[in-house]
Amino acid sequence: GTVSKEKNELLFSNFNINYNNLPEMYRKGSVLIREEVEIKTMNKQGIEIIRRKKTVTVLHTDIIGERFWKEHPEIEITIV
């Protein structure tokens, strides 16, 4: 609404910063999720093997919209 519009105008008029041109990490914030990734290694016989490991990944994305939740269905929300 109006508050966002006023903040954007303030940023532009005082600092010549267009909010819409900022990288997502400054507009959306940071989200940490645990993702499963594939790690390729070689065994003692020199054969390539693929292992799966969970690792923390930093995303700069909108978690309010549906896109994030469709891309990460493994994340469940529990409201108590």
Image: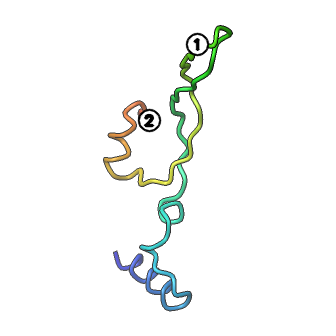
> The N terminus is located in which quarter?
bottom left
Residue found at the very far right of the displayed protein: 44
For the residue pair 2 and 36, the one nearer the viewer reads as: 36
- What amino acid is at disc 2? Val
Q: Residues within 10 Å of mark 2 (few under 14, many from 20)?
A: few
77 sits to left or right of 31: left
**Colour scheme:** rainbow
Kind of element beneath mark 1: loop
- Which residue occupies 64% across, 8% down? 45
- Which residue occupies 63% across, 17% down? 42
Q: Which mark is residue 47?
A: 1
Disc 2 target residue: 80
Taking 54 as reference, is 25 above or below it? below
For the residue pair 3 and 53, the one nearer the viewer reads as: 53
Residue 40 position within the rendered picture, expressed as x and y whole percent measured from the top left: 57, 24
Q: Residues within 10 Å of mark 1 (few under 14, many from 20)?
A: few
- Across the whole image, how many numbered discs are drawn on residues? 2
Kind of element beneath mark 2: loop
Q: CA distance from mark 1 to mark 2?
A: 49 Å
Taking 59 as reference, is 1 above or below it? below
Residue 25 position within the rendered picture, expressed as x and y whole percent measured from the top left: 53, 60
> The C terminus is located in which quarter?
top left
Taking 54 as reference, is 5 above or below it? below
- Which residue occupies 59% across, 37% down? 56
Marks 1 and 2: which is nearer the front?
Answer: 1
- What amino acid is at disc 1? Ile
